[in-house]
Image (spheres, helix red, strand yellow):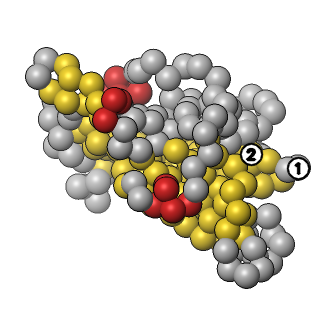
Amino acid sequence: MKKYIALIFIACWCSVLHTVAQTYSLSQLRAWSSTEAVGDLDKDGINDLVIIATPDFKENFIVEDGDTIDANVPILAVFKGKKDGSYAPWRQYDNALPPKPGVFVIIYFSLDINDRGVLKVGLEYFASAGSYGSSNISYVYRFQNGDFYLIGEDNKSFMRNTGEAETYSYNYLTHKRQIVRYNMFDDKVKPRETWSNIPKKPLKKLGSFIMGDS
């Protein structure tokens, strides 16, 4: 399964990211295919909004061997909540999320903000052909010191034909990694759990790397 995950994530997404050159309004982002979440990110008592939107710029559609690939890169934008219930642009990132890897691989994005203001960004990879593998990655961010920092990560994968599954969970605050291997279809297979330490490194900022290729 690790080979399957590696194959999915192999792409030319290796450059360091920057905030977008053009800032899009919330109405513009909502006009595209999008998902969003609302919650108090900076703990000021006012709800903020995070949205992931994929542009539909036709010039970014690529034709390879007769197949059309949408190479538009999704935008992740954070809007600051105001007392009147409206939102003001806060942060926008253009290359924080990966584009569609290929014709037969689909990425579903999800967002959640819990009651502690922690932001979770989810990426679910589904191969409609060529592989039985499926994977789901979530990145956990906390707003601190004026920016959003990655404090946790979960990488789950399983094979739809055999039910073999594994989960890699990283806690970048405690510097621990948990690995659980199990079977989705067979409850008789006892889960195997292992823990290990991970190197202490400065926390990554949102937008400083490409999610799904970390």
- Between 132 and 51, the one lying in front of the other is 51
* Residue farthest along the bottom direction in this orientation: 84
Percent x, y of residue 69: 25, 30
Q: Is residue 208 found left or right of 146 in the rendered image?
A: left
Identify which residue is drawn at 21% across, 23% down.
Answer: 63
Task: Label 1: state its secondary structure.
Answer: loop
Residue at which label 1 appears: 145
Residue 3 showing in the rendered view: no
Residue 108 showing in the rendered view: yes
Q: Is residue 102 found left or right of 86 in the rendered image?
A: left
Task: Label 2: state its secondary structure.
Answer: strand
Say if 202 sits above or below 155 in the image. Answer: above
Amino acid tagged 2: Tyr
Percent x, y of residue 99: 41, 34
Amino acid tagged 1: Asn
Identify which residue is drawn at 79% across, 64% down.
Answer: 42
- Between 74 and 39, the one lying in front of the other is 74
> Is the C terminus in the top left, top right, bottom left or bottom right quadrant?
top right
Percent x, y of residue 52: 50, 53
Say if 83 sits above or below 94 in the image. Answer: below
| Contact (Cβ within 8 Å) of mark 1 with mark 2 | yes
Percent x, y of residue 89: 69, 57
Identify which residue is drawn at 37% across, 55% down.
Answer: 33
Identify which residue is drawn at 49% across, 55% down.
Answer: 29
Estimate how packed mark 1 is, as few (under 14), some (14 to 19) or many (20 or more) residues with alpha carbons within 10 Å: few
Estimate how packed mark 2 is, as few (under 14), some (14 to 19) or many (20 or more) residues with alpha carbons within 10 Å: many
Residue at which label 2 appears: 149
Q: Is residue 44 found left or right of 111 in the rendered image?
A: right
- Between 23 and 187, the one lying in front of the other is 23
- Between 137 and 42, the one lying in front of the other is 42
